[in-house]
Image: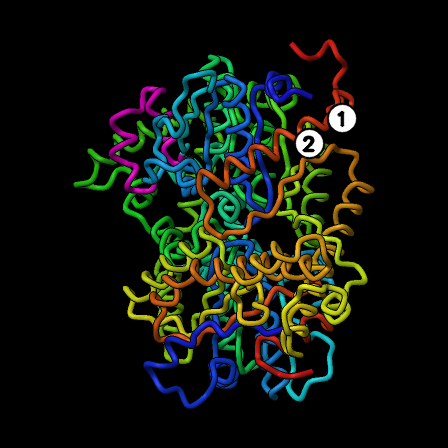
Amino acid sequence: MDPGQFFTAPRVTIVAGKGGVGKTTVTAALAAVAARRGLSVLVVDIDGKSTLPSLFGGDESPLGYDDRIISPGGAGHGEIRARTMDPDEALLDYLEDHGLRRIAKRLSQSGAIDMVATATPGIKDVLILGKIKQLERSRTADVILVDAPAAGHAISFLRSAGGLLDAVAVGPIETQAREVLAMLSDSTRCQVMLVALPEETPVNELIDTAYSLEDDIGIALGPIVMNGLLPHLELEGIDARDAFETCATAPAADERELESLNAAATFRRHRQELQHDQLQRLSDTLPLAQLRLPFVFTADLGPSELSQLADEMVASIGNLSLADLGRAPQDTA
Amino acid sequence: MNASDMSPDRDDSAPPARSNREGLRDLVANASVMVCCGSGGVGKTTTAAVLAMEAARIGRRSVVVTIDPAKRLADALGLDGLGNEAHAVSGEWPGSMSALMLDTNATFDDLVAQYAGSSEQAAKILANRFYRNIAGALSGTQEYMATEKLYALHNSDEFDIVIVDTPPTRNALDFLDAPGRLTRFLDHRLYRLVTAPGRGVVRAVGVATQRFLRSAGKVVGGEVIADAIAFFQAFDGMEEGFKDRARAVDRLLSDPGTAFVLVASAKRDTVQEAEFFADRLRDSRIDVRALILNRMHPQFGDGEPDADVEESIRTAGSEWALLHTNRAQLNAIARSERTQVAGLLDAVSSAIVVDVPLLPFDVHDIATLDQLAGELFGRTR
């Protein structure tokens, strides 16, 4: 599938997963791929402490409440902008919009805002999703990527609208909640892409989250992204001593050297096996397409690593078919 | 496989009589409270469980408070929905190990029952809808209840050491900041105004507050605001008890017998979080006593990837080359990780630093916890 096609519908993709699996990196790679196809991208970071800017180089100061360009457009490249959405700010804005301007600001120090938020659990999340819905409707960018809160909070984040409606919400906030639910349950407008590492606990959590999202919330799931995949080296049955003896040009190697080469190979084989088992288990348990990103051999990621990841993402998307995404040909527009 | 020793440079400047792993064993042998802090996803819960297991192994009665354990680990520790009380983990130890999974709501309910003036007051609060929302909606409540549980277990005399996992928030500092948020929430001028609207000199502000609440009610629903007001009226008088309790908990956290253990991995964001946390603790005049670096890639041989890369190019196409390519890649990761954590090591200069290698198995039961303990405490198996 062409990446341009991948990003046309739905417009909003929420990237979710347990802490530490690389959601921000995956979000950045998706943004880079969309931009390469000439699409404009807005990345919304909910947690607000994003390492996203450092992946694109340039200004690494924290993201703010206003859009900032983190990758300029031009020459067939789309522009990538990013911003945070602070939950407390969102509630304050909302109260101000409803004629509570001066007093809301004055009382925000006193905990009045906390009181309103506690009286209506999930309201901040609904308001954030409401803003995202507004951005989607106003077509402010071709593609909106949301770097969701980690782990279990992603579920309560997405459940917030339904929860609020169940809890007797009336008035303007009820309308917001209904409109948010409408967006979340429309697969042509919004999808969730879950991210995991190829290890037991992250895969377990991904499976649980996937079922919760589909059953409880009715949100569409896009392809899963498996991150940090170790490139495969075919080390099966290789022993350092045999390798040494059959390699005519190998220099002298003592016992310690051979031991460490063997130890490294054993480590690699174990990791690859673990990885393979987890990928298989995931395929067997969840009928969702998988995109795969490789492990990057540096702990500090920057623009050149991001470019590499974007290449891999393009290749991975290329392997998808429309059927993989559960779409009939006429669904793409 | 050589697990890399993370602190050769620091060992040169200060002459420790014992290794870091021995230092960690001493900490487990002597502390009365250990708090495991750090970002989500670094292995805090597993680390907390292993520390508790080690305490049991050396003859102490330990209890671990978990927050959000992975299902398999929870099952292994017998935590399948057995309520908010500690119960023994089965195993052959000279001491004993117990575990519990924090139930934020139940802990809050217990506090209310304890500090209410009467059982009627307690019942009114427990039934109030706004109260039921607090645990889930007000951030910091879970952290508050974790410290509260810690305090209660410490005082119970059933245990020699309490080990606390902290909630997997994005911001590791929440654990220190959050409890204050709840106490302020429960005891704020605003709520006095709400509950005593007509009183004397504050009448003018009281009126504005009431107008705000009426307007807020129109936006979010009048009933829910009424619930909130009813809660604060019912809670009236209990603030002092809660404040006293919070102060006592604070004293326990600053006590010399309490050890803060920072858990991190070599990823940029967890390292940054850990650095912030160490700085914040220092501001409160608390030292990080131990830093545990989880999931560190081990180093193989002398760790020089360039020599391996040259060799693999030179003998390209052979199995010999493949072995060198592999070792080069793995050592490149190990080196990069060590660079990543260098700043963190400086930030916790007085702490015991122990690194735990990336293990070729998932840790989710007593047997694998025991293997992890072997790595953490330097025992040969």
Q: Is residue A121 above or below residue B127?
A: above
Amino acid at dot 2: Pro
Q: Which residues are magenta?
A: A86-111
Q: Residue at x 43, y 55 (%)?
A: B172
Q: Which residue is mark 1?
A: A324
Residue A327, position in %: x, y?
A: 74, 18
Q: Residues within 10 Å of mark 1 (few under 14, many from 20)?
A: some
Our reading of the magenta stretch's main secondary structure is helix
Residue type beneath disc 1: Asp
- Residue position for label 2: A223
Eyeballing the image, is B93 above or below A235? below
Judged left or right of residue B83, residue B189 is left
Residue A10 lies in the magenta stretch = no
**Label of residue A306 in the image:** none
Q: Is residue B68 left or right of residue A53?
A: right
Q: Residue at x 55, y 27 (%)?
A: A33
Asked whether, in this view, residue A236 is left or right of residue B96, the answer is right
Q: Is residue B337 above or below residue A186?
A: below
Is disc 2 surrounded by few (<14), some (14 to 19) or many (20+) residues within 10 Å?
A: many
Q: Earlier in the sequence, mark 1 or mark 2?
A: 2
Q: Position of residue A281 (x, y in %)?
A: 79, 47
- Disc 1 secondary structure class: helix
At horizontal 40% and vertical 54% (from top left) the residue drawn is: B272
